[in-house]
Image (cartoon, rainbow, N blue to C red):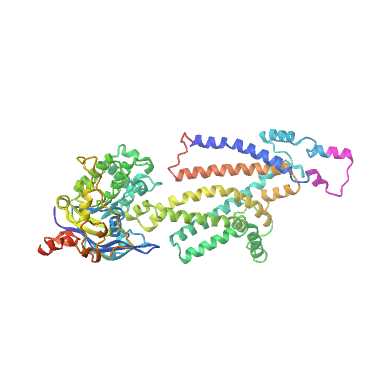
Amino acid sequence: MGKEIILHVEGLRTEFQTERGIVQAVNNVSFVLHRGETLGIVGESGCGKSVTNFSILKLVQYPPGRITDGTVLYNEKDLLQCSEDEIRTIRGKHIAMIFQDPLTSLNPVIKIWVQIAEALRLHQGMSKKDAKAKAIELLKLIGIPDAEQRADNYPHQFSGGMRQRVMIAMALSCNPDILIADEPTTALDVTIQAQILEIIKNLSQEHKTSVIMITHDLGVVAEMCDAVCVMYAGRIVERATIDELFYDPKHPYTIGLLNSIPRIDQDSEEHLHSILGAPPDLIDLPIGCPFQPRCTHAMEICAYKSPPEFSMGGDESRTVACWLHEKEHAHG
Amino acid sequence: MIRYIVKRLLSLIPVLFGVSLIIFFLVRMIPGTALEMYMGTQVEATPEQMVELQRIFGEDKPVPVLYMEWLGDIIHGDFGYSLRTGRPVFPDILSRLPLSLELTLFSLVLALMIGIPLGIVSSLHQNTFGDFISRITGLLGLSLPQFWLAALMVMAFSGFRGWIPMGNYVGFIVDPLRNLKMLFFPSLAIGIGFAAVVMRYTRNSMLEVLQQDYIRTAKAKGLKHRSVIYTHALKNAILPVITVTGFNTGYLLGGAIVIEEVFALPGIGRLSLYAIYQRDYPIIQAVVMIIATIFVVVNLITDIIYALMNPRTRLDDTTR
């Protein structure tokens, strides 16, 4: 894997204005994505992983959402400074997205092939006829039987798995550099999940597409990702390679997540592990470490001072935001 | 599709039967019979003359018997004769129907042309000054009574300004421009209330649709704002507007009946109004039957348009 950086997110902050106050959904998030790499972003619901990725393409709806700080460098261009017209030429062409719920994410009154062909006509200037042929070709590629006939169907005539395939075909139609997959398998049956992941994996490898895989499912991470960022309450609390994450997790939250995976060899009398407590209220965050109220290792300092990201062994791609690991950082 | 249309057209039969029953007995509940209206208070007649007149006016038999006779006649396409003029009812109605239908259609088109764009603009600039103004306008349009608006228009735009041509009505085929000039303000008076309804439906529907995931998908594809709004959002947002339009076309036709009187237009509205004054039962009955038919057919057309616009409704579904 080459180490060429294709996307560099730095200090991203996104907030939402609500009636109760300002919600800091994304709080100083930074990460890099390398060419051909699959990066996992893991965390509980509401930890800001989706908003982070909507922010990259400026798809956060304003109002109530607002990106307040940060840079997103793609091809040496800061996407956050782009005008609407400029970013439109990036969306779908260079950076494409797949969403969580394939039923609500497809337009119910527009034919399947038209929805796939839209991006082709827009970004590659294809004629209607060529775009339709290409759309059918893409449908075949992702394994839709009778693609010629099914292309004229509407989304409600497709099954959940097929709809998500259509989303993938749509996203990959213009051979984007980056694919952002926002919980692509969450709404699907387990048997279909594996197929969808397989398709994303194969196609991204074939076209050297970098993937940002947003998920709460560590199984998906193990299956798909090269590197992982663990998010909690709008921040990245740990970043690691896939092996480091599973064999040497550092942050108590990551450890809690890993322990929460039920094991087949577990004694059935035993309770399932879970992290005690609930995610914090993003409007009223604790002063110190946001995980401190739920943390079994909490120390005095955790309550009043938020930990920075400590890099382990001076490696910027291996960090932990936890006071427990301050020393490892200092001694390198 | 054909099967569905045939089925819906067959459902016209019970509807029309019910309407015929109600209207026949209802008009006879208005105090004063056709004969009494005809005689007035000053005319004297001998008992023999009265018996003869009762026979002519169809007041010599019990109402249920009259109903059966009338039903038998209209099944054969015979709507009877006017009690006042003695002329056959059907040709008279037929000559006046095009005006009323044109008025309805014109007001419908005006309402949609005003309501849909205002609704879209309003939804895209939610809670701004423009949205505020169009919502207030919409509320005004809803609350102003048609006949009052119509009377105001007559006062303001006819006479010396001549915006509403005076004199005899000319058909569309004879002189389209003059015809449209004559019907513009009446149509506006009828349609403005409905325009407000359309505007509010469009606005609410757009606001809801714009929150949907597929709008985000469309944006993520890099589509232009225009395509997102007009291709992706409007195609979905227009569906409830179609439904409400279908229901309201019947009311627009009802509105036409009142407004014809204000603008002195010779449509079926004026015809039936005078028929009611004079208890000219055959005319009233025929007009109501025809309006009921139009209402059902318009709703059928609406449903077909809806199905064509919304692939999720399948008309051939056997479970329907």
Q: Residue at 30% across / 48% down in the picture?
A: A170
Seen at 88% across and 43% down, the residue is: B45
Q: Is residue B51 magenta?
A: yes
Left or right: where B256 falls relative to A165: right
Q: Nearer the viewer, residue B3 or A11?
A: A11
Snapshot quadrant of residue A199? top left
Left or right of B62 in this view: A328: left
Q: What x and y, as percent, mark residue A250?
A: 17, 56
> On the picture, is A150 further left or further right than B1?
left
Question: How many numbered discs, if any?
Answer: 0
The residue most toward the right is B46
Residue in the foreground of this view, choosing between B70 and A184: A184
Residue A223 point in image, percent of width and height? 20, 46
Q: Which residues are magenta?
A: B34-52
Front position in the image: A43 or A78: A43
**Can residue A148 be seen by looking at this rendering?**
yes
Spot occupied by residue B317 in the image (x, y as percentages of width and height): 46, 36
Q: Residue at x 50, y 34 (%)?
A: B3
Instruction: Say if the magenta span includes residue B282.
Output: no
Is residue B2 positioned above or below A203 on the image? Answer: above
In the rendered image, the residue lying farthest to the left is: A331
Corner quadrant of residue A157: top left
Locate residue B35, reporting x and y percent.
Answer: 80, 43
Work out whether A107 lies above or below A143.
Answer: below
| Above or below, B158 relative to A264 | below
Q: Is residue B110 visible?
A: no
Q: Main secondary structure of the magenta part?
A: helix
Q: Along the horizontal axis of the image, is A93 left or right of B285?
A: left
